[in-house]
Amino acid sequence: MISAPEVIARKRDGEELAPDEVRDVLQGYQEGRVAEEQMSALLMAVFFRGLSDLELRTWTDTMIASGERLALSGLSRPTVDKHSTGGVGDKISLILAPLVAACGAAVPQLSGRGLGHTGGTLDKLESIPGWRAHLSNSEIRDQLESVGAVICAAGSGLAPIDRRLYALRDVTSTVESIPLISSSIMSKKIAEGTEALVLDVKVGRGAFMKDHARALTLARTMVRLGDDHGVRTRAQLTDMDEPLGRAIGNAIEVEESLAVLDGGGPSDVRELTLILARHMLELVELDVDPAQYLDDGSARRVYDDMIRAQGGDPDAELARGSHHQTVTSAHAGYISTVDALSVGVAAWRLGAGRARKEDPVSAGAGVEVLVRRGQAVEVGQPLFEVYADDAEHLALGVETLRHAVNLTDDVVVERPLILDVVGATE
Ligand code: URA
């Protein structure tokens, strides 16, 4: 058996750990032989020293082996999933999963809840009356076969050691480490049993990764880990300086997703959904045009089936906060930024997000963004429609939004939505 202090010291001094050492220390932590303070020290050493390719592969293997792996082989369709690193207004999964299923694949999207200023897919779907996030493994499999798409809570059996490591990283300031983020995300996705995976790595002020170079390293690291584990993986870097679409919140994002599924909605949401769908379909070698399946109503029909299969009513009226205010522009000019971080924080303060894992979220709180980067605005022109369940939350959100739009006297150039692709055209 390894000595935890020796392993910590070797990592601290920049030496490469042997596969046995990585495995033993993680298994020891899972079994209670390695103490929280020892794992905290090791995480900090990894934060500063990084992990070699072999160390990272072994670390990820051990995380996967800490729990169960979903058995999805034997389905009549190929499986492919998408993971986003989280952004403001990112409701793409709600449209993408049924769309790719309508095109002939099975999409097992095991998701999480939102924390802080980025929203969670499950929180959005839970604003649909009756919809149920928790499914058993056999329900997941049956729904993949019958409907083709499942969005549900990732069960506690997938890479269970990640929950403890993530909680420890959170209180030891070791979250922002590329090998630790990569192993955390990829262990859960690999354990989910998908054959192929597209990663949407968000970059910018509203994202977890603010910096292009670091986001690219994260994307390359995750693509390598996926490929090494037999999951065909591709990543794309997308801009998150500005919110995606116009709606930010829970029910309000479901409404916007329905608009896209019905052939309308904001052009950036439609464009990103179709680009991601094309990557997913290429990875599982389905030669079809997803735009056709969006426009002919097939994706909407799969969405309705997916929601009904999980107890929800796809036609139910959705909540909208009873308190409402319009935020207007105090100045005239061209919009240089609608700041994704401020809009995300505003939605969170309105009640749409949570500060702690166990907090409830409001279905009806949220923001509708009425303007885009580059647009000319006049004094008094409406910028945001703001909704909350009470006056106190409304005031907090409105205050944050007063600083969310930056103006300039010059005409502003458009920025591309897609910044890079890893694993395909590199
Ligand atoms: N999401 C995860 O699941 N893990 C991380 O470490 C960061 C984001």
Image (cartoon, rainbow, N blue to C red):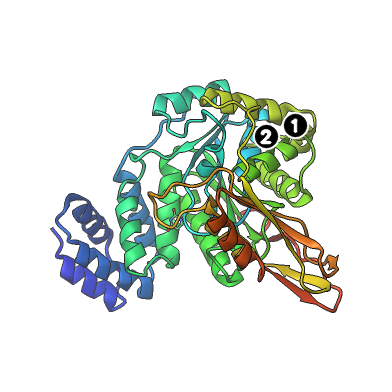
Instruction: Please state the horizontal and vertical placement of residue 150, each as a whole percent of the image.
Output: 53, 32
Q: Residue 94: x and y, percent? A: 62, 39
Give how far across and how far down residue 97 sits, in percent. 61, 37
Ligand 1: quadrant of the figure: bottom left
Quadrant in which the C terminus is drawn: bottom right
Residue at 35 percent across and 57 percent down: it is: 166
Under 8 Å from ligand 1: the CB of mark 1? no
| Above or below: residue 162 compared with residue 396 | above
Residue at image point 28% right, 79% down: 13
C-alpha separation, residue under disc 1 versus residue under disc 2: 7 Å
Q: Quadrant of residue 416?
A: bottom right
Residue at far front of view? 391
Q: Secondary structure at mark 2?
A: helix
- Given residues 137 and 228, the one toward you in this image is 137
Closer to the camera in the image, 83 or 259 = 259
Question: Is 238 positioned to the left or the right of 295 in the image?
Answer: left
- Residue 283, position as x, y percentages in the image: 62, 42
* Disc sitting over residue 99 in the figure: 2
What is the three-letter code of the residue carrying label 1? Tyr
From what the image shows, is residue 279 above or below residue 311?
Answer: below
Q: Nearer the viewer, residue 85 or 215?
A: 85
Residue drawn at point x = 67 percent, y = 68 percent: 402
Q: In this figure, which residue is indicated by the disc labeled 1?
A: 293
Q: Is residue 283 visible?
A: no
Q: Look at the numbered disc 2 and say if its residue's Cβ is closer than 8 Å to ligand 1.
A: no
> Mark 2 and mark 1 in contact (Cβ < 8 Å)?
yes
